[in-house]
Image (cartoon, rainbow, N blue to C red):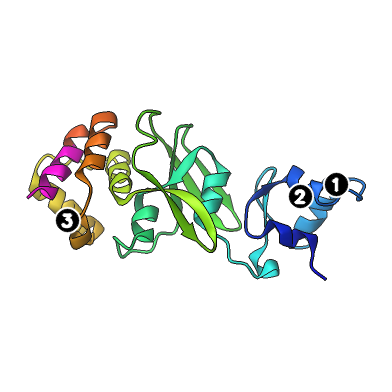
Amino acid sequence: MKDVLDILGNIPVTKETISSLYPDVAGSNQKVSSLEHSGKLLRLKRGLYIVNPEWSGKRVSNELVANHLYSPSYVSMHTALRWYGLIPERVHMVQSMTIKHSRVFENALGRFSYTGVGRDYFPIGLRQGETEGATFIIASPEKALCDLICSTSGVILRYQKEAQAFLEEDLRFDMDAFSQFDAGILQQCADTGKKTQSIETIIKLLGK
């Protein structure tokens, strides 16, 4: 017999949604707590849960979880660049951008960080990603690189040789993929975000 929690799959849901699955159970909040203590549910933050993948057998998309934990937000920086296969290093934290205040969450799935950006800058270069049967919002490669440059202290790219060293030595970036970047997205970021000079140096390097 299938459990009613199978309806939820691997999507983060609120306590109220879970409670609604048990209309005949008195004290639905206690039911949610019981499911958590039994290991069937994982608490992502107060009031937000996901079915434990060890119990459901369905893998969880941490990128989708990141979108739900703190919204509006999108996955970016090292996490996105790694997801696209543009950098070789494994990333031990899911990095996202938000129009809200910067925050960090930790739960059973890992560590999730959020960096605040301006409202005009936020929607540039976003796209839909998919993994584990779940869709989520992620930065394009160009936007993810701009986010990383803008949000990393000490990264000031005044000359093309500095930009090239940053990509090749610091990030070990896939330079063949970089050569296919959309300069239009980079320029939009330069016009709207921080570190305009650094991003425009990246644009000049791309145009070589």
Instruction: Establish if 161 lies above or below 189.
Output: below
Where is residue 104 shown, x and y percent of the image? 51, 43
Upstream in the sequence, badge 2 or badge 1?
A: 2
User: What is the chief secondary structure element of the magenta stretch?
Assistant: helix
Q: Which residues are magenta?
A: 198-208
Q: In the rendered structure, are the residues bearing label 2 and label 1 in contact, judged by CB atoms less than 8 Å apart?
A: yes
Near mark 1 (Cα within 10 A), the count class, few <14, some 14-19 or many ≥20, is: some
Upstream in the sequence, badge 3 or badge 2?
A: 2
Q: Which residue is mark 1?
A: 28
From the viewer's perspective, tell me whether residue 171 is left or right of residue 139.
left
* Residue at screen point 62% across, 54% down: 11
Upstream in the sequence, badge 3 or badge 1?
A: 1
Which circle marks residue 18 in the picture? Answer: 2
Report, in whole angstroms, how far the alpha carbon at label 2 lies from the one at label 1.
9 Å
Q: Which residue is mark 3?
A: 179
Of residues 23 and 90, the one nearer the viewer is: 23
Which amino acid type is shown beneath numbered disc 3? Ser
Total residue callouts? 3
Where is residue 59 shown, x and y percent of the image? 58, 66
